[in-house]
Image (cartoon, grey):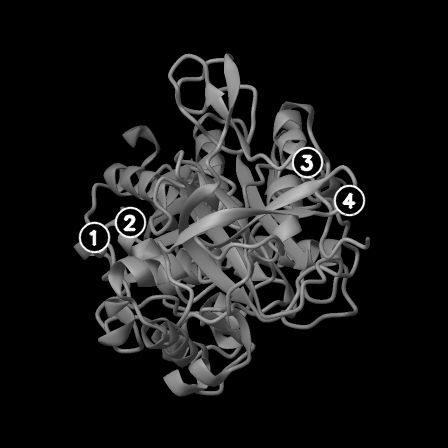
């Protein structure tokens, strides 16, 4: 397992030309903008790319065709928004075995404007057992995870709100963030109720954006334009699709599995991290992920946000781009935390830069804590 | 009768005894013929021991509200139950959990509590399809 440690590097990252509300751009265009931008960031050419990894509605073959290249390695694993994080592991394995030399992981989603999208969802099970009761949109499901957490641990609405407040503080420092205006706990509590216990400000944005990540083997990475970011550890896992099938409604088994492997492969422990990126589709997500990853005991993840540890200036900055809550969230958010962690480890983040960031953890969920991917990234071996 | 919600579909063959049971006013659950595990949703393999021997048992219809959310808007045009409505996950006495709605109680987090005892009420949608909803135990009456 340790064979893969530090073998692959992230050498290019970028978003599409614009992110936000983009009614004039198709989903495929968002992919192509992000890929060309990220490949340029790496100092490579599209013709160097021979591995394509993507999740969502477009297949890797569609991207290859549109780019005008014939990749020799493709992966379309689609297990929710964390698929792009999981694909870093898949890409590292493919690079290690020489199945490709330059891998691009791409995301493009017209989540807000719905331009150039196809509606094909797997509803064989939800159509029978969930949709008839009003379930469907993600908040209807994650609300139940959150309510049970409040019941078991006494977590409060104010504590969840603090996650939104903290994340907005980071967003204020990111010029690309959609929402930068400071908010208070009271603002979150008094926002429009959507699905109790969530108001609108407990729920991520819905935007249009693309993002891409370029990887190559460590030996080649040294000669490229930017300082390489080493993939030191990686892990993935899935537990369920329907939250009725979770062993424990308040704990993500998939997150635990992915995190344990990633940390073991990297040979690091929780206290070694300078920076953490977590998939914040909802305010209750990051605390539950911190608990499932072992950064906090069950019920205590909210303390990171409450006591300022994870806010600007704190000892363990979390979601420094402003997160899905305030920066951007297309639907499958997982590419963006990888982009932010890479920028932090390169020292490119301006006012939101975490001083001397050397070790970053990226963790994302797919579905409702159903799948998970974890990365340990570093700017040193 | 115009259904107040999306009619379950596609009804898959392995779930036939479940849907037939609901139509007859019974909550039927799949049970492993080898290890005795009662589970939900219906499938052709036991998720505990992977046996292909699946039998069916009638559930008591009693359970506990494992968790809930309160919907303040509809997320699906075909879901016409007026908000606020209660999105519920029930843990049945027999063990499995299922998604449903809690009805015949105020959609208020001060009234609705995790682990409160609940009981099934059968809610016909069409001549062929009935869905199981739940209400606080002892509410009584037919819906």
The answer for how far apart the CA atoms under marks 3 and 4 are is 10 Å
Measuring from the top left, give residue A193's x and y in whole percent. Answer: 53, 76
Tell which tag, 2 or 3, sits nearer the viewer: 3
Circle 2 sits in a helix, a strand or a loop, which is it?
helix
Query: Which residue in the structure is indicated by mark 3?
Result: B23
- Dot 1: within a 10 Å radius of its alpha carbon, few (fewer than 14), some, or many (20 or more) residues? few
Residue hosting label 2: A293
Q: Secondary structure at mark 4?
A: loop
**Residue B5 image offset from top left, x and y in percent:** 71, 54
Q: Looking at the picture, how far across and down is residue A270, in whole percent?
A: 21, 52
Is residue A40 or residue B9 the one in the foreground? Answer: B9
Question: Disc 2 and disc 4: Cα gap in Å?
Answer: 46 Å
Say whether mark 4 and mark 2 are on the same chain.
no
Nearest to the eye among marks 2 and 1: give it: 2
Pinpoint the chain carrying mark 1: A
The residue to which callout 4 is attached is B126
> Which sits earlier in the primary sequence, circle 2 or circle 1?
1
Q: Chain of mark 2?
A: A
Closer mark to the observer between disc 1 and disc 4: 4
| Residue matched to label 1 | A270
Dots 2, 1 in contact, CB < 8 A: yes
Are the numbered discs 3 and 4 placed on the same chain, yes or no? yes
Pick the residue in front: B115 or A294: B115
């Amino acid at each position: 397992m340790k064979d893969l440690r530090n073998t692959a590097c992230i050498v290019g990252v970028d978003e599409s030309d614009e992110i936000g509300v983009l009614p004039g751009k198709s989903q495929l265009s968002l992919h192509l903008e992000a890929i060309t931008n990220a490949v340029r960031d790496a100092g490579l050419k599209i013709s160097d790319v021979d591995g394509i990894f993507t999740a969502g509605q477009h297949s890797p073959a569609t991207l290859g065709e549109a780019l005008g290249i014939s990749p020799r390695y493709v992966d379309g694993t689609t297990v929710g928004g964390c698929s792009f994080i999981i694909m870093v592991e898949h890409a590292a394995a493919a690079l290690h075995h020489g199945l490709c030399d330059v891998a691009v992981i791409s995301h493009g989603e017209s989540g807000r404007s719905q331009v150039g999208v196809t509606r094909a969802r797997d509803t064989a099970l939800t159509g029978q057992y969930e949709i008839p009761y009003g379930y469907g949109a993600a908040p209807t499901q994650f609300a139940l995870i959150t309510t049970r957490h409040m019941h078991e641990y006494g977590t409060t609405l104010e504590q969840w709100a603090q996650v939104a407040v903290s994340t907005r503080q980071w967003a204020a420092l990111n010029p690309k963030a959609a929402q930068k205006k400071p908010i208070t706990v009271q603002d979150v509590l008094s926002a429009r109720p959507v699905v109790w216990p969530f108001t609108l400000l407990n729920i991520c944005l819905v935007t249009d954006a693309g993002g891409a990540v370029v990887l190559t083997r460590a030996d080649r990475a040294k000669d490229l334009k930017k300082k390489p970011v080493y993939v030191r550890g990686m892990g993935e896992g899935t537990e369920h699709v329907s939250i009725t099938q979770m062993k424990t409604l308040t704990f993500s088994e998939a997150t635990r599995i992915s995190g344990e492997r990633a940390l073991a492969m990297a040979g690091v422990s929780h206290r070694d991290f300078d920076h953490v990126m977590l998939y914040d589709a909802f305010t209750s997500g990051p605390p539950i992920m911190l608990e499932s990853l072992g950064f906090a005991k069950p019920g205590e993840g909210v303390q990171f946000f409450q006591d300022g540890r994870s806010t600007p200036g704190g000892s363990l900055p979390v979601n420094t781009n402003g997160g899905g809550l305030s920066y951007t969230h297309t639907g499958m958010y997982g590419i963006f935390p990888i982009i932010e962690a890479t920028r932090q480890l390169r020292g490119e983040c301006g006012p939101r830069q975490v001083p001397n960031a050397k070790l970053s953890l990226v963790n994302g969920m797919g579905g409702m804590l159903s799948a998970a991917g974890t990365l340990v990234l570093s700017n040193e071996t | 009768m115009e259904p107040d919600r999306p009619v379950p579909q596609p009804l898959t063959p392995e779930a036939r005894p479940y849907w037939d049971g609901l139509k007859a006013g019974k909550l039927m659950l799949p049970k492993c013929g080898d290890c005795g595990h009662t589970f939900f949703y219906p499938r052709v393999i036991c998720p505990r021991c992977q046996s292909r021997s699946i039998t069916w048992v009638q559930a008591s219809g009693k359970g506990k509200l494992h968790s809930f959310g309160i919907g303040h808007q509809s997320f699906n045009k075909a879901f016409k139950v007026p908000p606020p409505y209660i999105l519920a996950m029930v843990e049945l006495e027999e063990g499995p959990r299922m998604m449903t709605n809690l009805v015949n109680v105020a959609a208020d987090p001060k009234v609705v509590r995790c682990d409160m005892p609940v009981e099934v009420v059968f809610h016909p949608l069409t001549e062929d399809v009935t869905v199981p909803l739940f209400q606080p135990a002892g509410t009584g009456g037919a819906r």
